[in-house]
Amino acid sequence: MRIGSRSVGAALALSLFLPLAAQAAEAAKKKAPTPLSAYELYRIYADRTWTWDTGGGRFFEDGRRFVAWVTDKGKQSFAEGKWVVDDLGQLCMRATWTNAEGAARASTCFGHRKIGNTIYQRRQPSGNWYVFRHSSVHQDDEFRKLVSTDTVSAKAYELKQVLLNQEPARRGG
């Protein structure tokens, strides 16, 4: 059986092209954002306090408890609930928020993606993506607002006591 010179040339070209195509596909895959795993998110948030301009939230490792407090437009609220993470890069805080007017359940979620060692975050479902942590952490990265000190629990407990003591007055009793 005789192989034509065209077949040999095509086979040679293909053998040279395939490794380059595979390398290009691998490079493209590395640049595409990938979700953080539940384990990666757990390592970022467990036993940390996320400090906010208006308050903060504490992610307890034990029982995945979530406790928070905020002051918004002069009104103080506290939250008690759970935090969950998944392999789709999502962190959710599911809690009951209580203020002087009552209580309501809420679920707030944030998506996390990475490209290389840079982590991006957005409020789900339709917030804008922003850099959560640069590959070499910057002073103004949101990631730096996660601190090991619990600056939330005492304030949330104090607020809870104040609001619970006001409750009979709200009911007219």
Image (cartoon, grey):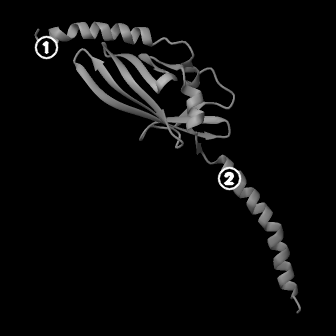
Point out which mark residue 15 bears: none
Q: Residue at x 64, y 35 (%)?
A: 118
| Residue 42, percent from left and from top | 56, 30
134 up-or-down from 52: above or below: below
Q: CA distance from mark 1 to mark 2?
A: 61 Å
93 up-or-down from 126: above or below: above
Assess disc 2: are there few (<14), some (14-19) or many (≥20) residues with their C-alpha within 10 Å of its C-alpha. few
- Residue 43 appears in which quarter of the rendering? top right
Q: Is 157 left or right of 150, judged from the image as shown?
A: left
135 up-or-down from 77: above or below: below
Q: Quadrant of the N terminus?
A: bottom right
Nearest the eye: 55 or 41: 41
Mark 1 sits on what residue? 171
Residue type of the residue flagged with mark 1: Arg
- Residue 79 appears in which quarter of the rendering? top left
Mark 2 sits on what residue? 28
Q: Secondary structure at mark 2?
A: helix
Assess disc 1: are there few (<14), some (14-19) or many (≥20) residues with their C-alpha within 10 Å of its C-alpha. few
60 up-or-down from 111: above or below: above
